Amino acid sequence: MFMSPKEILSYLCNLEEKLPKREYKIYKESHKHNDYNFSHVTPGEMNEECQKMLAFAGMGSYKADARFAKLDDSMAGCTTPGDTADGFVHIEVNINMQDNWKAILATLAHEICHQVIHLHGIRPMINNMTEVYTELCTIYLGFGQLILDGYNTNVRGVKHNLGYLNPNNYKVTNHLVAVVCGGISSQSTSLFGNDVMVDDAVRIWESEDDRKEFNKKTLERRSEVFSETMRYISNMESLLDIYRQQLKQQADKLDKDFTSFNDAFRTGQSRSLRIFNTLYTAYCEGQNNEKDGTNKVLEAALYNLYNDVKQKVGVVELRPDVVCPSCGKRYPYREINKGKMTVKCGKCGTHFVADTTDWSPSQVQRQVEQRRIAKQKKQQEELDAYRYQITAEEKAAAWKEAECLKQELTTIREGIDKLPRIFRWALKNYIHIQADKIIKTHKTKEK
């Protein structure tokens, strides 16, 4: 997956807002293993390193439970976000990477950050977004060098290519975080031409004077652009008013000529020159195509404006909506036109009259936005209903399990009651002794 620097920054800004403020530090690994001379990483060494990484990520109150497991070849590791009720962070690492210390570190950093973003309320509904947040979080927290070193490795001929993002995305992110959050000089973290615009922005950032001047010039330029845009819109509205007046005059003249043409025919040959003049004028206007030329200019302007609005605002529907009265099918009409139109429904084939007299692009856009909001609301309601159903099923299963345990206890009590009195007395004392031991142990742990 490739992400632009602008997209990366939007994710990083959200992480900065949600995660606790902390001093930027770069994580230093404890064990320096040479992957070519080191045979196997032991579970103890991995667990010790994982505990240190948890403390570095702000989860020092949890204990590490990292272990090697046989996973699918497409999986480097796995963890269940939020499964920390027992005080442990459980992580499984693919056993195929037991010889690759760098890949193990990158995997541990990724899985730990799954727990970090879940703990701080970053829980996107789309899985890909979760993975993007997790990948960027590893670098934001200071595991960037582990990620760069461990996501593409080759140990004794065995290659491991990990990660969800494009390799260049990791370099850009590490570069931005190190310079902006860590205050590290860009000369030591240069992208060497991987992204020229990021390098230029970083150079401006590093110089406080340049940064202030750049912000000042940017605001001034944006103000000038806005003013110029408003002037263009005002001039365009004035020109459109001139067009409307001209078209109104031409429409009045056309109506007058049509009336004169009919009157001349009714009065006979005495008005032959008037008839010929009308025909000649109509022929000349038809050859000159003044109105067609105007329409082409307006069409080109509308097309350019539409593309510009689509880039800045999103897709804007300019066509009026029509609804079939028979089947209720709703769709935008194929033409941009005001008035009453005879429409054939593409679904049921019914012909009906659609009234678009009050149509306007802004009104259509509001309708599109209202339908989008209604669709999102419906999806959220369906998701809430699904979650409620799962919760109800879990409660029913727990209740059923409790009833089974209750039945087993009843059976055990009935069996004990059938024993001789001396055995019941001995069993009762044994149970009390064991219960006292459990209570004392629990109190000691609490202290």
Image: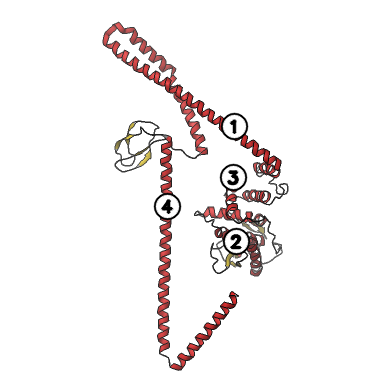
Q: Is residue 320 above or below residue 140?
A: above
Q: Which mark is residue 6?
A: 3
Q: Quadrant of residue 272?
A: top left
In the rendered image, is residue 131 in sight?
Answer: yes
What is the CA distance from the residue labelled 2 to the residue labelled 3? 26 Å
Find out whether the residues at labels 1 and 4 contact each other: C-beta distance under 8 Å. Answer: no
Q: Amino acid at mark 1?
A: Glu
Q: Secondary structure at mark 4?
A: helix
Q: Secondary structure at mark 2?
A: helix
Which numbered disc, 1 or 3, marks the residue closer to the eye? Answer: 1
Q: Is residue 120 above or below residue 375?
A: below
Would you name the residue on which mark 1 appears?
224
In-front residue for pair 250/435: 435
Would you name the residue on which mark 4 appears?
379
Q: Quadrant of residue 362?
A: top left
Percent x, y for residue 62? 60, 66
Q: Residues within 10 Å of mark 2 (few under 14, many from 20)?
A: many
Q: Earlier in the sequence, mark 1 or mark 3?
A: 3
Residue in the image at 29% along x and 12% along y: 263
Would you name the residue on which mark 2 appears?
112
Q: Earlier in the sequence, mark 1 or mark 4?
A: 1
